[in-house]
Structure formats: C-alpha cells, structure tokens
Image (cartoon, rainbow, N blue to C red):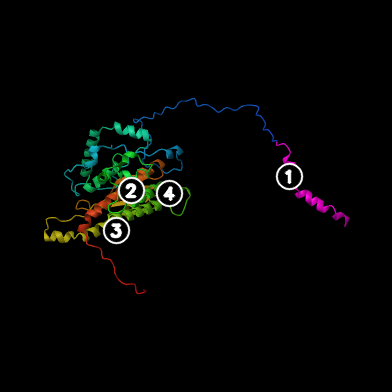
Amino acid sequence: MAFLRGIPETIWNYVSPRKIQHRREKPFAFKAPAIPTRVTTLPKKTSPLTREMSPEVPVKTCDPPASTTHFDIDATLLPPSPPASAVSSKDLESDMLAKKLPAARDDQTEGSSADLWDANEETMVVDDGTYMIAQKKVNHDQERQRQDQQARELRDAGWSEDAVFLFQKLGMRGFEPLMPISWIADLETVPADLFTENIDKAFIKPAYGTEHNAQYALERLFDLGSVSRDAWHTRTKRAPHFQIGKAVKAYTRWAMKDGGVEQLWSHFPLFQTVTFSKHVHPAVGERKMIEKLDRLHELWYDALQIDQATDRGDSNVPEVPTLYGITATHTVMAFVSYAPSTKKNKQSSVRLLAMYDFMQEGCDVWNSLAISIFIIHCRNRMMQLREWLPEPEISMEEDPDL
C-alpha cells in the first residue's frame, strides 16, 4: 500500500489554489504577428463619377422589368419617389383630376387589355432632396393641360368616368396629399408632402372607424414588398402571388368594415382578385378574370333591376358601376377595368390601369399606396351605391346543435 501514500498529495497539487496563483504571477505575453515584407495598397479608381444628382437626371424607373435576384443594397436606404407624370399643387388638390367632358359610348370603341395605358409607367426612384427640387421644376399649367388631354384620350378610348378618375388618381400619387398629418410621425418612410392638415383633402383616411385602425392597416400593407421578396428568395410554399392576394384581402376587409359596407361587399363587390403562379401563361389569368367579372356584372345588373326600370320607362335607369380586377403573378400585380360586351363588341374585355413589380425594393411604399388608393376608391364608391342596392339577407336560423 506504499504506492497510495503519494496520491492525496498529487490530487491536492492538482486542485490547489497555489498553482493558480503561480500561473497568475507569470508575465503576460503574446506572440507578435509577422510583419509583411511588402505593403499592399488598394487600387485607386481612375475614372471619376459622371452621374449628376440633379432633378433633370432620371434616376431609376419603376417600370416592371424581368424578374431578377440582384438588388442594389443602397436603394433600400433611399426613400422611393412619386411618379413624374404629376405634381403637387394647391390648385390641383381641390379640383377634379379630370374635367367633365362628353363621354364616348361603350359601343364606339373596343376595350382591350392590350391598350397602352399604365398609370405607373413614369414612376421614378430618387432621394428626398432630388424629389423636393424636382417638384418645384414642374410647370403646373402644363401639367393641368396634360391631365386634360389624357382624360380626353381615355374617354375617346371608351373609358368610363370612374375609370378615368381612378387612373389619374393612381398617377397623381406622390404629388398631392394623401394622408392626415397626424400619421406623419409613425410613417417615417413617406415624404412629408403626402400629409395634409386638411382632413377633407386626405384621400387615404377612415370613413367611420378610428385613425389607429386605418394607420395600422396601411402599415401592414407597406410590408407587402419585403414579404413578397422573402417568399421568392426562401422558396416558401406561400409564393409571392399568394402574399399579394392575402394583403389585398386583408386591406379590403378593413376598408369595407370601416365604411360600414362589409355586408354589401360580400354580395356585390366592385372588383375581383385572380392570382396565379408564374408558370401559368398570362392569357389564362386574363381569361379567368374576364369570366369572374362577367358573372359579377350579371349580378349587379340583376340587383339594380335595370330591366324592370327600362320596362317601366323610368327617367333614371341605374347603370352597372365600373368593375375592376386585381391580378397577381409572381411579384407582379396589375389593376384592370372591365369593359362589358356591347352590340358592336360581342366579347367583354379588360383594360390595363397600372402594373407594379414588388421585386423592386425602392418602390415598396409607392406600390402599397397604389393598392390603398385603389381599395379606398372602391370603398367610397360602394358607400355611394349603398342606397341603390337591396339590403343583404342575414340568416337568423338557430343552430340545431345548440
């Protein structure tokens, strides 16, 4: 047992604090890194920047390009800009965007989705300073003349007054106040010129609900761009077109409830939504949209009792309101208006209002504002049509299981 005598001492030396203290008393030292034999210098740029940051230089258009996975990181730090086709003006704020002119009949021209009209075709992305300077460079008189000329051309193409107003309202976003001034503190990414102290001039606002709910619904809509891109990059089961349809449905639910027309909207909506995969041909989605709008047009025609009013010889025969559609495929979303069949044009069709691509990070706010304008317009129109529609029947049957 003699070999066991040294074990306690060995164990004690292993855990003894004196050993730790002994190590602490050693001087600290570290190995110096080797000095490189040659200093490497970064190459200098030989060509100066030729790009001018001035209002006259277009920066980046928001026309929907082909889908790509490359993005400019710096663009996410810049606030997106409004379309260059319109300007903010006190005179334009209180006036109608399009003056009343003799409207062309539907049977005079043929509607088609191939019409070369797009309220978003001239949208640009610029920084805050350039945006403010560019605003002052626009000639207000020329802009008013351009708006009037555009309205005449749209009416000559067979567009309804409602569709002309919505088209130009979408094109004016960014150059006129849209929201109450009380929202400015919470919406930091939106330029200050889009807020107004005059609540009557604010287009995006609650009708009967609270401002908190209206602002919350809009803030959620602002997240649609990033959510759609994340869905594409991560290859989730919920594709970008699904996320767009989901956001449109959620904002519509708030808007109609806010206007007190949610029950009527569930029976007589003013627009339909069609979403489909990027692998589906656009013609298939267009055909499906036309079929849905055909059925919706018949529903409105019967609800307004147009045939009965015509047979009675009423002086004021109601008309089916302008119907719209929202289509989404991949990250691209489009607004269309419905052109019903006429004696001349046997086939109904849709006309393009505007097209937006959520793959572009710099346009997130402006694309979301376009959705808000579109849905708010339909809510306001629905509130006007409420008196012409029969009250929807609400089932009061008792549940037999209760």
Residues in magenta?
A: 1-28
Residues under numbered marks 4 and 3 in contact, where contact means CB atoms less than 8 Å apart: no
The residue wearing badge 1 is 20
Alpha carbon separation for disc pair 4 and 3: 27 Å
SS class of the residue under badge 3? helix
The answer to whether any part of residue 14 appears in the image is yes
N-terminal of the pair, mark 2 or mark 3, is 3
Is residue 358 rendered magenta in the image? no
Using the numbered discs, state the Cα–Cα distance from disc 3 to disc 1 in whole angstroms.
76 Å
Residue 58 seen in render = no
Question: In the rendered structure, which amino acid carries the disc numbered 1?
Answer: Ile
Name the residue that disc number 2 marks.
371
In the figure, residue 52 lies in which quadrant?
top left
Task: Classify the position of the C terminus by image quarter.
Answer: bottom left
> Which amino acid is tagged 2?
Ile
Amino acid carrying mark 3 in the image = Glu
Q: How many marks?
A: 4
* Residue of label 4: 227
Q: Position of residue 311 (x, y in %)?
A: 13, 61
**What residue sits 81% from the left and 50% below the top?**
10
| Dot 4 crowding, Cα within 10 Å, few <14, some 14–19, many 20+ | some
Give the numbered dot on residue 262: 3
- Let me know if residue 25 is in the magenta part: yes
Amino acid marked by disc 4: Val
Q: CA distance from mark 1 to mark 2?
A: 69 Å
Among the two numbered marks 4 and 1 on one chain, the one whose residue lies closer to the N terminus? 1
The location of residue 136, given as percent across then percent down, is: 29, 32
